[in-house]
Amino acid sequence: MSTLGTVFRRELVSYFITPLAYVFIVIFLALAGAMTFFLGSFFDRGQADLAPFFTFHPWLYLLLVPALSMRLWAEERRIGTIELLLTLPITTTQAVLGKYLAAWACTAIALMLTFPLWLTVNYLGDPDNGVIVAGYFGSMIMAGAYLAIGSCFSALTKNQVIAFVLSAAACIIFTVSGTPLVLNFFTGWAPAEMINTISDLSFLSNFNAISKGVIDISNLVYFASVIGVFLFINVILVELYKAR
Amino acid sequence: MPPMIELDHLSKRFGAITAVDDVSFQVKRGEVLGFLGPNGAGKSTAMKILAGFLDADSGTARVCGLDVADHPIEVKRRLGYMPEGAPSYSDMTPLAFLNFIAESRGFRGDKRNDHVDKAIEMTQLFEVLSQPIETLSKGFKHRVALAQALLHDPEVLILDEPTDGLDPNQKHEVRSLIQKMAPDKAIVISTHILEEVDAVCTRAIIIAHGRIIADGTPEELEATSPRHNGVTVSASANTLDALAPMLRDMKDIKEVEIGDDSLFVLAKDGKAIYEDVRVLVRQQKFDVRDVRPERGRLEDVFRSITAGNGGSRGT
């Protein structure tokens, strides 16, 4: 476990000794703010909640998380440090988890820095803080799922741009499968159960459920399974790279 | 004493290319094995398998008696590895980087600092400790990678081209470091600088097309050179013209090559002819500047056995 911590710390520090973490956090905060106030009409709604803030998180992550995760393995492969990392007495699983958790921590820091919004809404009205906590929690675990997808695709190539495009594409699929855009395509000919299943497999529907303040075990299991499956594939991809 | 490193019929293919083809050898404690071969001969691949970075297709690699494939973590604990090109996390400083390596090798607190300090001292990194690695010269980057490999004082050291790209002084330092560590470790270095083998290796293996084609001490390999035990005679052109026919008549002499101001006498089957040539020159009172024996250069051996099809297979 302590080796995992070592990998985690090195990776997290590396986000902050380069401009990467700062750029990510600043853009995240700027976009989150812009979406909340302009697209989400935070003030005009006249309601003391953070729904307009959380609604846009899936789209925000869609854009920013692949940018954060694309370097995770692709860069190690490109500059050859993967050879160094994998010849240390560290298991592949420890390396994958350590790097992944560092990226997640970076996202968590960005998310926590949106606290002025929470202060604002408490100053302006009397929101249900339980729902807001659930929203932050849901957003966090959803970011973890996006990151797991990104980390997995990053291990597939040594080209960061390819890693970005592939993970963004996969993230889109997982996001939009719950939108009318996709569901309408199936409505009319596909059985209702199938439509429900497709909708259930979407980040949007699972996240929306949590951010309404209802933390259902099935939503948690869903995100946890996405994370588990993609990190598992990630470990296999790194192992395959050794066996190539 | 069991060998510290043991390769047993190791093979590795990349698609249609066989990078390592049925390679077997052993390295004992105290030995410094020079791994020689043209580019693409399979040196790095074999070292990567040994370091646990690549899986072999068949055969086994053992370090300290442990199979690399079955006990990867145990093997990596006992082994220091410097990959080709000396990669390191370039945005970190050498100090932060070495601390990371020490911690991932399980050293904490004072123990970590002791190991890092020792590695810094051995590789003389004091002056660059707090500069990002990416801003360092190639020589320092190399030393950082070397420090990383020997930080935990491993029993087995695998160094892939440890002196590549270094200036002559730095090369000398790295070689002295290797010699200093040699007695209680088993060390494998790959190189294509042949003087390096003479300077630090107790044994050399030449590999081409993935196969071992020669294995022996540097002296033994030199003895297989066609120029081994030859003699160079330096004199004026007239003297050389007169001397050459007499040399050709002597026994044990295979051939005489005449150059502008020296000639080279090739010995038959590597026989010792130096004394005979010297006696002849003295008896006939030839006016020569110098008579000098040749050991045979490793470079000639290397060229003659790695050019073309790689020659016949040795042990």
Image (spheres, coloured by chain):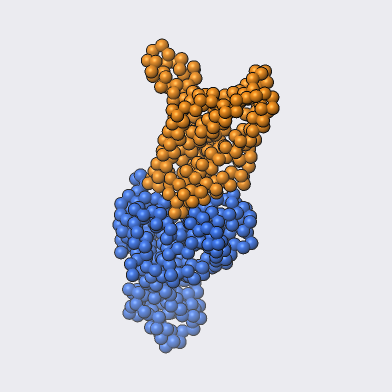
* Residue A229 at least partly seen: yes
Determine whether A73 is above or below B308 in the image.
above
* Residue B301 at least partly seen: no
Number of marks in the rendered image: 0
Residue drawn at x 47%, y 21% as measured from the top left: A178
Determine whether B62 is above or below B274 in the image.
above
Image coords of residue A239 (percent x, y):
40, 45
Q: Can you tell which chain is drawn orange?
A: A
Residue drawn at x 48%, y 56% as measured from the top left: B105
Chain B colour as displayed: blue
Image coords of residue A19 (percent x, y):
63, 42
Relative placement, left or right, of B172 versus A49 is left
Determine whether B120 is above or below B233 in the image.
above
Camera-side residue of B120 and A158: B120
Determine whether A138 is above or below A44 in the image.
below
Image coords of residue A92 (percent x, y):
43, 47
Q: Quadrant of the C terminus of chain A?
A: top left
Image coords of residue A117 (percent x, y):
65, 29
Residue drawn at x 57%, y 30% as measured from the top left: A133
Residue drawn at x 35%, y 53% as measured from the top left: B69
